[in-house]
Amino acid sequence: MIIFKHTNDISNYLFFSEASGKTTGFVPTMGALHSGHISLIEKARVECDVVISSIFVNPTQFNDPADFEKYPISIEKDIDLLEKAGCNVLFIPSVTEMYPEGLAAQKHYELGFIETVLDGAYRPGHFQGVCRVVEKLLHIVHPHQLFLGQKDYQQCMVIRKLVESMGIKTQIVICPTLRDADGLAMSSRNIRLNEEARRKAPLMYQTLSSIRQIIKPGDLSELKKQAIDHLTAGGFTVDYIEIADATTLSLIQYWDGHTALVVMVAAFINNVRLIDNLIL
Ligand code: AMP
């Protein structure tokens, strides 16, 4: 695996080396890697000749500075995991390398409704920051395919919109959420759960699974209320649990029984914010 820290070096390598002319798959990450990330690398290996990953904890997508400060970092272990998984090229830029213009300078992305709903409402500016870094990374790497996790469902929709609106030719591949044996979606943030919180955390997936089992056409408000009560009783502080149209993310109050749905949740357990979703 070749590691690059500078934009020009990785661009030149991908353009002029033996990597050029081959199909490339890109897996951007913020590090603290787990098997969920590695499943994206493995999928990219199957689909593409050259697999490129990046590790960059992107400051512009953290609306809460404390969350940024506490973001776990395990670079040596990450490099080892990527190497073992067969990643060919790794990009680890610094903040100044990615943002030579400074962090304050802002370009605004027109994302419409998907930016203001769900996580967009609770994390103002978050998806603008995601677009800012992903646009830069895509212009550096120019991958044929971009591999993203369904775990970040709304992020996938935002990036799809970004790619379409900028006329970027990269194909987006959305990969299933990897879970621990008890159902908890793997996340870099899980490292921050203490023993008690880790024990309680699978309730999030259990709640989503119950919704999938019992949902019926009609008014969904009672179902959502019960889900919030259930999570709250189990020790969570809920930001939202919502059922939405799986293609547009419009929130659904009355279900016609036909529209494809996704149930989305964000909640804190012991000050750690977890998100998850299930297609119903
Ligand atoms: P992050 O490092 O959290 O920015 O995640 C990097 C990529 O890995 C994103 O596309 C995530 O959606 C994806 N990812 C994170 N957790 C999982 C998981 N449990 N299963 C599959 N993909 C994941």
Image: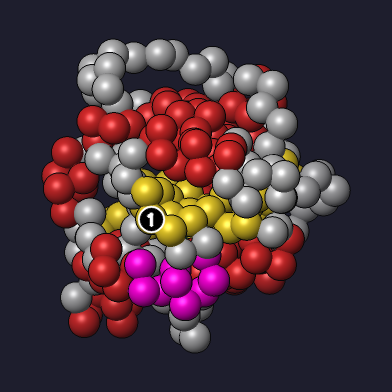
Which residue is at a point 30% across and 72% down the rendered structure image?
Answer: 77
Q: Image quadrant for the C terminus?
A: bottom right
Quarter of the view holding residue 233: bottom left
Quarter of the view holding residue 236: bottom left
Q: Give 92 or 265, whichever is nearer the viewer.
A: 92
Which residue is at a point 52% across and 65% down the rendered structure image?
Answer: 87
Q: Give 236 or 214, whichever is nearer the viewer.
A: 236
Q: Is residue 1 left or right of residue 250?
A: left
Q: Which amino acid type is marked by label 1?
A: Ile
Image height check: is 70 above or below 202? above
Q: How many marks?
A: 1
How far from the left and from the top, in percent, is residue 225? 48, 53
Name the colour scheme.
secondary structure
Range of residues picked out in magenta = 79-87
How far from the left and from the top, in percent, is residue 30? 36, 52
Provide the residue designation for mark 1: 3
